[in-house]
Image (cartoon, rainbow, N blue to C red):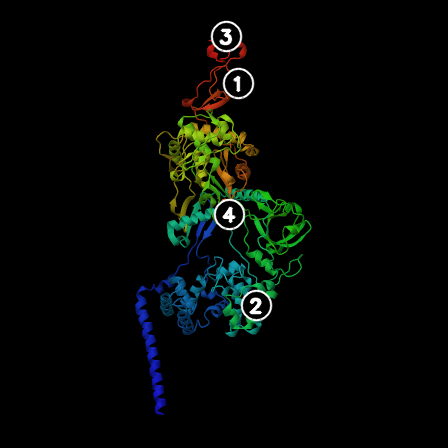
Amino acid sequence: MTFLRTLILSAAWLLVSLTTATVLGVVGAALYFAPGLPDVRQLQDFELHTPLRIFTRDGKLIGEFGDERRMPVEFDEIPPEMIQALLAAEDGAFFEHRGVDPRGLARAALELVSSGGDIQSGGSTITMQVARNYLLTLDRTFTRKIREILLALQMEQILSKEEILELYVNKIFLGHRAYGIAAASETYYDRPLVELTLAEKAMIAGLPKAPSTFNPLANPERSLIRRNWILFRMRELGHIDQVAYDEAVQAPITARRHITRPEVDAEYVAEMARQFAIERFGDEAYTGGYRIHTTLDSELQPYARRALADGLIAYDTRHGWRGPEERDIPPSLVEAQDRTERQGLEEELAESPEVMQTARRAAERSQTRVEGIDGDVSNWLQVLERTPGFGPLQPAIVVSSEGREMRVMSRGGELHTLDWEGLSWARPYLSPRSRGPEPGSAAEIAEPGDLVRILAREDGSHRLSQRPDAEGSLVVMEPDTGAILALQGGFSFSASKFNRAVQAQRQSGSIFKPFVYLAALDSGLMTAASVVNDAPVVMEDGSNELWRPVNSSRDFLGPTRLRVALARSRNLVTIRVLQQVGLDATLDFLKGFGFAEGRLPNGLSLALGSADLTPLEMTNAYAVLANGGFQVSPWFIERITRGDDSNVLDEALPTVACRDCRDGQTEVEIDGRRHPVAPRVADPTAVYILRDMLRDVIESGTGRAALALERSDLVGKTGTTNGYRDAWFAGYNSDLVATVWVGKDDNETIAEYGGNAALPIWIDFMGTALEGRPEAFPEPPAELVTARVDPQSGRLLHDGESGGISEIFHPDFMPDYQSRRVDREVEQRSGSQGTGAYEAIF
């Protein structure tokens, strides 16, 4: 008996000691961590955040960014079943504990010991999650867990359970930018919470644990298992009866992606504005209600986007079919679930075999039939729903390939028949320069279950397509201000977020040549009629090798006037022009066009466009040509407001070209605002002469295809770099300047000239953008001189001499006169045979 009493007393003292130690440990931790804890009371007045919104210059939405795409709800607005589903999934004892669940903490402690200090999941109640989401960082450490516990205990003293749960449901991330259960309801089901079924509520309740892994759009097979586990828990906790459970676990997946579409597709510019906002406002940019109004033109931007996409698709069609994006996709969810990976679902599958069984039955009940297709296509529909569109290209799954006809299904179960005209282009891609033979049947192109892309045609039918292998950009600017009116940085932002318009530094090729010619005209060392020998050049390249540049046509024209050389893009003439002007003098001159001096090569290869420059930089340089020689800079943010547009935080005041301003004038008033006048960086007469020379590129040179626009106010220049890696066209009139670049991100050849790959895109855009607009020419400078010259020598002809061609000049830089020539009969009569000189007779 004495032994038993002693044993009981010892056990009691041990329990008291352990309890005391635990209490002292908690008190010690509280005393240690309390001074650094955030104030819990701030949650009582927590304000929901307003996202960053981006607009065109006329107020049309192009983008919305924010950590929270939310629709806040109050506790009384939350359906009881939604609460029960969340508690079953995350914290079944929420209304019983005081912020901390001892059993969950014990489980976390075991993880802590076994993992060496890294907490993988465990023990977080909903109160602790609120503390973490609102007040702490998301690092998985022991000290953060202690702070989380202490904050949870404080919260339970200050806030009611209803207030804590309200904070929780409005903050949790639930995938696809949806923060909070109300936003998730709209995102996945396009309905308010109160209209959701029990199965749909359970599906949302399953997302907080892993919004991507258990997402009904991205992973429908796994989400079914997670959902049915939650329903199983709800039944076990007594929240729902057997009848409701049986109905819910068999419900098919009904989630679809529902998003707010921008009014104008300009995702590359929206991203540029987002980056600017982050640099300016930090993380508050996403939450502070900022509104950024860009310079984008809501009419021109869609033209630019479509022209680039159509041009890249046309390029890609010329080079062959690379095959389906994905093969052998199972049509039904049942087949897909049989193939799904089980890793990460251990907790759900270990609960009861019933979970897997009910998930399979739900998959079976999710079967969907589409008229015209035999069998269940529920998985095909899910795959199409989660596969993004790339520009005008939409995903489709091949249903049948018979003879010379292919049937495909696109989103929503729409069936399309692709005729042979829309398929026969799909010769196998072999290399950038070669294709295989034309296919003999549709089955050679793709088979049932293959994921392909389709493109709508003007008559409503569809053709087979694919994401282009080449990329591109199109930048449009207002010459007088430098404002960016349209910008497309790639084929599709959803396919690639790399903005080639501002981030891709590519060799500019021949579109750089006009600036070398302008340096010669501006200096007075040469005129448009100056003759330069188009002949081989051999020189040291700085290493032990000799540099032997050639013309793209591999021939030589001999003595050639500058006007002709520019129109025909003669490399060797351009090199000799640069030699005559001088490399240092040319580099100094080019500073005025926005080219960074350190990025321009200090060698004669500069003449051939070896500088790595972005399409935006080249567009800005051409804007200086288009506005008559004023140094404008590119800009795209017009003003920043907050809350509403009446609260203006900042407004742009760009430098502008002013042709009518007097010398020394530094400001000009435009629409009631004073703007600084952009400095002149080139003589206006030289710029005008260059513009006239560039017209010859279109009239008789490498840009002749632009004559199809039937406008005489357009000028421009093609460009192609070594190995056909880059194709360019830059051109303008007095209203618009636009530059197109086409190439591959890996710098592989595209095997086409600028006139083939880039110029058609420019023509497509300019033809639409300028439709209905009058031709826009610059005023000729008053001092401009027109004179006749000999086409062979470039020298002036005397009055009365026949023949010759008309040329324009700066009056201070006129060429010498051509020596007069006489015919052979006059020579014989005068006794001056063989001289051919007029002066020998008189």
CA separation in Å, label 2 and label 3: 112 Å
Relative to 195, is 264 above or below? above
- Seen in the picture, residue 357 relative to 429 is either above or below; the reply is below
Rendered-image quadrant of the N terminus: bottom left
In the rendered structure, which disc, 1 or 2, sits on the residue that comes first in sequence? 2
For marks 2 and 4, give the CA distance.
39 Å
Q: Secondary structure at mark 1?
A: loop
Q: Does residue 323 show up?
A: yes
Q: Of residues 792 and 315, which is closer to you in this image?
A: 792
Q: Which residue is mark 1?
A: 803
Where is residue 98 shown, x and y percent of the image?
39, 72
Residue named by callout 2: 359
Circle 4 Cα neighbour tier, 10 Å, few/some/many (<14 / 14–19 / ≥20): some
**Earlier-in-chain disc, 2 versus 4:** 4
Q: 10 Å neighbourhood of mark 2: few (<14), some, or many (≥20)?
A: many
Q: CA distance from mark 1 to mark 4?
A: 55 Å
Real-space Cα separation, disc 4 to disc 3, in angstroms:
79 Å
Q: Is residue 364 above or below residue 777?
A: below
Closer mark to the observer between disc 2 and disc 4? 2
* Amino acid beneath label 4: Asp
Residue that numbered label 3 is attached to: 831
Instruction: Bin the neighbour count of mark 1 within 10 Å (Cα to Cα): few under 14, some 14-19, many 20 and up.
Output: few
> Of the residues tagged 1 and 4, which is closer to the observer?
1
- Amino acid under disc 1: Gly
Residue designated by label 4: 265
| Kind of residue at badge 3 | Gly
Q: Earlier in the sequence, mark 4 or mark 3?
A: 4
Q: Position of residue 16 (x, y in %)?
A: 33, 80
Q: Secondary structure at mark 4?
A: loop
| Nearest to viewer (mark 1 / mark 3) | 3
